[in-house]
Amino acid sequence: MKAVAIDDVLKFRYLAQPTFSPEGKSAAFVLTEADRKANGYRSFLYLLRDGAVRQLTSFGKESSFRYLDEDTILFPGCREEKAEGEIGSIFYTISLSGGEAKEAFRFPIPVSKILPLPDGNLIVLGKTFPGYERLYTGDAKLLAAFRKDRKENEDYEEIAQVPWWWNGITYTKGAYESLFFYDVRKRKLRRLSEENEAVSAVNLSADGRTVYYVISPVGPLLHARDEDRLMRRELAGGQAECLFASDEKARLNGYSLGEHFILLLLADLRKNGRNSNGDFYKLDYAGGEIVFYAADRKSVV
């Protein structure tokens, strides 16, 4: 058998995020391929419609997207040369009927997720940097101080708090995701989650009036515990409400918004501690008890 050579691996093309349009008339996906000269990868957006596949983008930096409507896709990218230390994000829209991508939104912080609201405004998931929590305001002096601090400390990493990650090259520490409301007309972000709350798993209700998300505390590494909480917030001036809080008995591993109830994936820590697998439970939108979701068992968390 012939050994696999590097040239063979470089020919591989990887498909990800296949997503149907709202009416199911087309499907878009990400295609990633190796770039030997740059010693990295390039990603592009492709479209399948009317039985034909065509490439939508060509800059090689388009690795995620979402449909805004049947004919429009929104994606993050960078089609201009960034200044040294630039941390902001730019999102573009592209028409599936043809034409060039157009800039739609520009943010002063790294943004990983956008959820459009019925009124045209946005729910945004973006990064918060400890010590520079108000970078989302776009303050130029604060950004200059942040760039200087990062430049002076770029030669070492101190892992002293959670969350932190190993990305295959180095450690990423400190920065965590926060939840924001973006006023499109004013072009301003407003923080929804609290400082030192790392946000994940953000979803909107079907009517776009309520946002659901998971928070976990940002704190000293040695004090890390299972404290994830499922939160709900009415966007019309409502306060954040905790629907489920992990404790020493049960840990939240995930959730999904159903038509009639919220499906929770919970691990009973009394079984095997942190190694316990999760089971499915349901929680009515109106509240009440959390019930094991299985036909042959009736137990409550």
Image: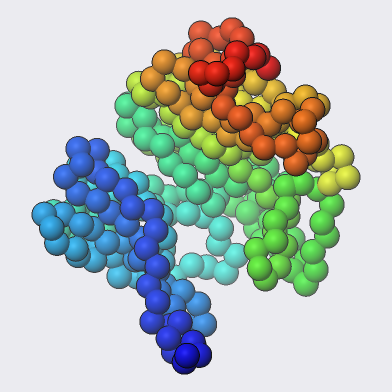
Q: Is residue 241 visible?
A: no
| Colouring scheme, one of rainbow, by chain, secondary structure, one colour | rainbow
Which residue lies at the image location 84% right of the left edge and 43% below the top edge? Answer: 220
Seen from the viewer's position, the closer of residues 85 and 262 is: 262
Within the image, what quadrant is residue 246 found in?
top right
In this orientation, does residue 294 appear?
yes
Q: Position of residue 261 (x, y in %)?
A: 47, 17
Q: Nearer the viewer, residue 82 or 288?
A: 288
Picture coordinates of residue 156, whole percent (x, y): 80, 68
Q: Position of residue 82 (x, y in %)?
A: 48, 67
At a point 66% along the width and 68% down the height, the residue shown is 168
Residue drawn at (68%, 42%), measured in percent from left and top? 133
Q: Work out whether residue 21 or residue 210 is closer to the camera in this orientation and state it.
A: 21
Q: Hey, which residue is sitting farthest front in the picture? A: 296
Residue at 29% across / 65% down in the picture? 57
Q: Is residue 233 above or below residue 162?
A: above
Residue 158: image quadrant is bottom right
Image quarter for residue 272? top right
Q: Residue furthest right?
A: 222
Left of 35 or right of it: where is 245?
A: right
**Count of all numbered marks drawn on residues in the image:** 0
267 vs 115, left or right, is right
Relative to residue 3, is residue 198 depicted above or below? above
In the image, residue 86 lies at what x, y percent?
55, 62
Q: Which image quarter is the C terminus in?
A: top right
Residue 63 lies left or right of residue 140; in this view the side is: left
